[in-house]
Image: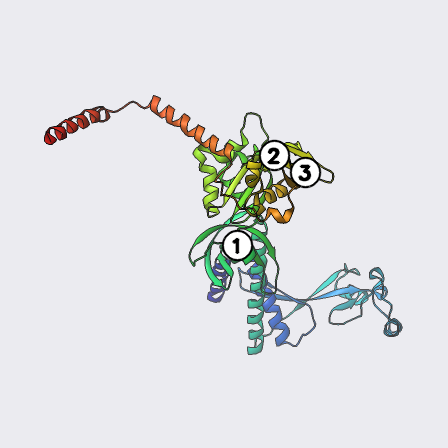
Amino acid sequence: MEDLKALVTAVAQIAEEKGIEKEAILEVIEVALAAALKKDTDRKGENIQAKLDTKTGTVEFWQVLDIVDDSMIYSEDELEDMKESEEEIPEEERKVRFNPKKHILIEEAIQRDKNAAAGEELRLSVKAEGTYGRIAAQTAKQVILQRLKEVERNSVLEEYKDKEGEIISGTVQRIEGRNIFFDIGKTLGILLPLEQIPGEHYRIGDRYRLILKSIEPSPRGPSILLSRAYPKFVTKLFEIEVPEVSAGQVEVKSIAREAGYRTKLAVVANEDGIDPIGAMVGQRGTRVMAVINSLNGEKIDIILWDEDPEQFIINALSPAKITEVKVMDKEEAIAVVPEDQLSLAIGKGGQNVRLAARLTGWKIDIQAEGASAPIPEEELEKVEVEEVEEPKEVIEKIEVITEEESAKEEITEEPTEEQKEEPKKKKVKVKKEAKKKK
């Protein structure tokens, strides 16, 4: 009875530590007991199953046999023909090679169980004699360790599969070369160099927000691939910071990103009376700044999505002022820009026009006013431009909100008695200082 209590306690402890269901652990123990019996009684090749009763501590064993009839097994002549022929037999026509350790004929099965039928299983009770030997016990131990690892892997895979594409928090546990390993709970996630934000420096113990990009099975268990450079990461951050986005009132229609440098988002309101850009920016820019801080200062342009391709391209090329957009065939367009707006429209190294093209899905060429042809692509990458902090419409919105709030504060807040006395005190001090100077 004491051994049974110890077993139940051990199962509960393993279940809590590994995050595995108790029933799954008991199944592992039953498989191990069956393997030990096969080893101890020389039943190699037989299908032995075990059932552990946790209330009494007793174990029952069965040999499971498949019931077959003559039409389901190969005859000697058929086996000889199969050796000579190289043709593959269709799956529906395949039979089984009779093995007395795995199969039993229907005639013999009926003698043991009147309800037996071909195609079903027959379970024959097996009696375990005494205790297991050293080799059998070692076999059981190996099976338990191996199966527990498999169950743990499957448990982790099932749990994190539902979180694919979601934001998770992780702590840097170790750094191997340029690969960063994060502790994300029950397992480790890996942040590969291509998924890192350029210029970020990771230190052991630092905590980061990441997106669970994908889960890939491997011999050592599922590999959980994380990312901070994935464009969807920015969208998910806005879902956390902006209630209107998570509620579906504001939708991010498209996104283009060069991680560590700049991101462009096209947004639209799904309900009347909502300003999508204002919702994304937040009061005094708090919402957009929270996302920028999570991205280590990466710049974010929020523009209004439009069904009209011309207007959408004009919006996407902000903060530059566009004179005209000429829509060509096969989703190609030429944006005509004033001479003084060329550098803004192109961006540093062609970044602005490049992101605008990804955002809209159109190939965009830049042409100066009065020019006969667009600027060649190789020339766009040579453009140098001063950094622009935020699109003009975003800056104006933040300033307007700030001015309105400060005006409200001045009207609604009445000065306290101490504040009323302060000007008088200051005047007295000035007079005293003036007398001293005289």
Q: Rounded to the nearest whole Å, what is the CA distance between mark 1 and mark 3?
A: 42 Å
Residue 298 appears in the rendering = yes
Which residue in the structure is indicated by mark 1? 196
Mark 3 neighbour density, 10 Å: few (under 14) some (14–19) many (20 or more): few
- Please provide percent x and percent y for residue 234: 54, 44
Mark 1 neighbour density, 10 Å: few (under 14) some (14–19) many (20 or more): many
Q: Rounded to the nearest whole Å, what is the CA distance between mark 2 and mark 1?
A: 31 Å
Which residue in the structure is indicated by mark 2? 314
Look at the numbered disc 3 and give the secondary structure of its residue: loop
Which residue in the structure is indicated by mark 3? 372
At x 82%, y 65%, the residue is 95
- Please provide percent x and percent y for residue 142: 57, 71
Nearer to the camera, 165 or 311: 311
Look at the numbered disc 2 and give the secondary structure of its residue: helix
Amino acid type indicated by mark 1: Gln
Q: In this rendering, which labeled residue sits more in front, label 2 or label 1?
A: 2
Nearer to the camera, 231 or 359: 359
Q: Quadrant of residue 401?
A: top left
Q: In this rendering, which labeled residue sits more in front, label 1 or label 3?
A: 3
Q: Earlier in the sequence, mark 2 or mark 3?
A: 2
